[in-house]
Amino acid sequence: MSARYFPGSTFHDTNSIETINNNEKQPRDLEQAPVEFHAVKRTMGNPSVLGLWSFGMVTILLGTYNLFLPTTSNHVIFPSGFMFGGLAQFIAGFMDFWYGGTFGGTVFVSYGAFWTGQALMMLSQFSSTLDAYTTKADADMANGIYHIFWAAYTFFLFGISFRVRGGNFLLNWCLGFVGITLFLEALSSFTGISALLRVSGVTAFLAAFGAYYKGLAELMEEQDVDIYIGYRH
């Protein structure tokens, strides 16, 4: 009889051993003690920490440019946007899916895709698609429409976050401020008011703070250190 392996829970299980007795009938002409097999329960680290911190990093980079350099190109954040905010968050999301985190996986993969797209638009090979717009006003309108729908999607997730299993204030905080950030960016594109972009930088900082804090709380929980402020219902 071969050992059976059981997958661990999504995040927080510790290693455990399960003993399986081999109770099958032994041949009558053999006197043999029952054989015991030890199946080690496989565990895995919490992918949400990576997802939250990658999300927080690119959000705080975006917030810095929106707040302090609203008229300056932010293309310098391409490497972090593509690899950390995009690819790393993608991986964390699919790992979360694999271990049963439907909502968390959806959020991480969604914003991983968002940041992959944002980063690709910083490359000249892809940003040339904006040449389809004959005037800056048309390009700004298209950019505003793009962000307004992402804001609507984020507010949709924000509403769901109040009802999902494992939801908490920090999750609500992150999604709420991300939605506000995207909405303000859309309004800035529609109106041309740079002050709205600067305010979106502030809300981006608040969203990033929530993401870093939530990731820290989940990491500390694995070390049996409880952080109660905002983390638990």
Image (cartoon, rainbow, N blue to C red):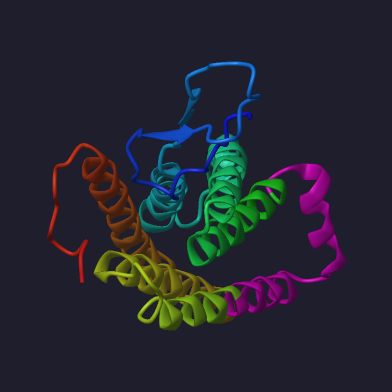
Coordinates of residue 192 in the picture (x, y in percent)? 53, 75
The residue stretch that appears in magenta: 122-149
Q: Residue at x 54, y 47 (%)?
A: 89
The residue most toward the right is 132
Rendered residue at 26%/41% (across/down): 222
Q: Would residue 54 appear left or right of 141 to someone viewing this image?
A: left
Residue 207 among those drawn in magenta: no
The dominant secondary structure in magenta is: helix
**Above or below, 71 relative to 148:** above
Residue 225 x %, y %: 14, 43
Please give left or right for residue 9 compared with residue 13 in the image: right
Q: Residue at x 80, y 49 (%)?
A: 126
Which residue is nearer to you in this view: 76 or 47? 47
Left or right, 171 with respect to 2, comes to left
Quadrant occupied by the N terminus: top right
| In-front residue for pair 100/63 | 100
* Front in this rendered view, residue 11 or 103: 11
- Nearest the viewer among 52 and 203 is 52
Is residue 187 visible from the viewing direction of this image? Answer: no
**Tag count:** 0
Q: Quadrant of the C terminus?
A: bottom left
Residue ID at (54%, 64%): 102
Is residue 17 depicted above or below 56 in this figure? Answer: above
- Which of the 4 image quarters holds residue 15? top left
Q: Is residue 135 visible?
A: yes
- Which quadrant of the structure image shows residue 205? bottom left
**Which percent across, then down, holds residue 27?**
65, 24
Q: Is residue 142 magenta?
A: yes
